[in-house]
Image (spheres, rainbow, N blue to C red):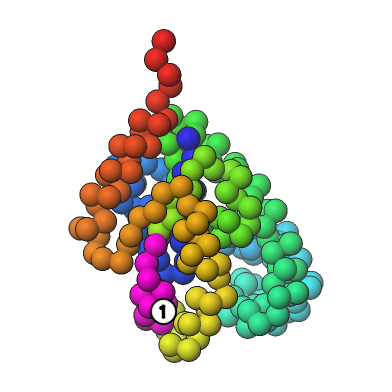
Amino acid sequence: MIIGVTGGIASGKSTVARAFAALGIPWVDADEVAREIVAPGEPALAEIAEHFGEGVIAPDGSLDRRALREIVFGDAAERRRLEAITHPRIRERLIAHLARLQAQAAPYVLLVSPLLFESGQQALVDRCLVVDVPEAVQVARTAARDDVDEAQARAIVAAQMSRQERLDRADDVIDNSADEETLAPRVAELDRRYRAAGLPPSA
């Protein structure tokens, strides 16, 4: 069984994934895969440079994410073009990583993806777990983590799928607005449920 883990920016998806990992559950991070497919030498990076210009390539040959973000953040057409370049490659790589983890015979595996719903990656999973925090928490965490001001942080949060829409599409929800000690019992509860759901039917 594959559990999709998603949530808005700074909701703590990786924190939740690490809590599951402490219980022996492997995971694939779509953000890491997204970085893999635009590494120097990858076809996606060459296509991005061809479309968006050499200004999005850093002196060391890597992708200048800040420069690219400035182009696509306020331009829906350019953002869709970037997604057309990256999303199919990310999906292909995710499928390969998930297959490798499933071959290890874990009780279930996680696909951690901020764009699980937006990219159609929910089609790869059996259940969707939304990591939820109030928007005010998202804004504060984003501003602190990404070194942006509050207005920029609010704009980033507002550009994503709404909190309510994510919750409406969730099979399970976990509140991550408190500390990790509070999170652990809820993760353990979900882990028991997912292990039970993944058991083969008795003979």
- The residue located at (52%, 54%) in the rendering is 169
Q: Position of residue 139 (x, y in %)?
A: 41, 79
Q: Position of residue 18 (x, y in %)?
A: 34, 53
Residue 12's place in the image compared with 91, above or below, is: below
Magenta stretch holds residue 18: no
Mark 1 is surrounded, within 10 Å at the Cα level, by few (under 14), some (14 to 19) or many (20 or more) other residues, namely: many
Name the foreground residue: 115 vs 174.
174
Q: Position of residue 137 (x, y in %)?
A: 36, 75
Q: Outermost residue, top direction?
A: 203
Magenta stretch holds residue 134: yes
Residue 5's place in the image compared with 9, above or below, is: above
Name the foreground residue: 124 vs 29.
124
What residue does disc 1 label?
139
Amino acid type of the residue tagged 1 in the rendering? Val
* Element under disc 1: helix
Whether residue 131 sits left or right of residue 69 in the image: it is: left
Viewport quadrant of the C terminus = top left
- The residue located at (37%, 71%) in the rendering is 134
- Our reading of the magenta stretch's main secondary structure is helix
Whether residue 190 sits left or right of residue 34 in the image: it is: left
Q: Position of residue 158 (x, y in %)?
A: 53, 77
Residue 32's place in the image compared with 192, above or below, is: below
Instruction: Kindly tell me whether residue 123 is visible in this rendering.
Output: yes
Name the foreground residue: 9 vs 64.
9
Instruction: Kindly tell me whether residue 24 is visible in this rendering.
Output: no
Whether residue 48 sits left or right of residue 122 in the image: it is: right
Q: Outermost residue, left direction?
A: 181
How many numbered circles are shown? Answer: 1
In terms of image quadrants, where is residue 147?
Answer: bottom left
- The residue located at (20%, 58%) in the rendering is 181
Q: Which residue range is magenta in the image? A: 132-145
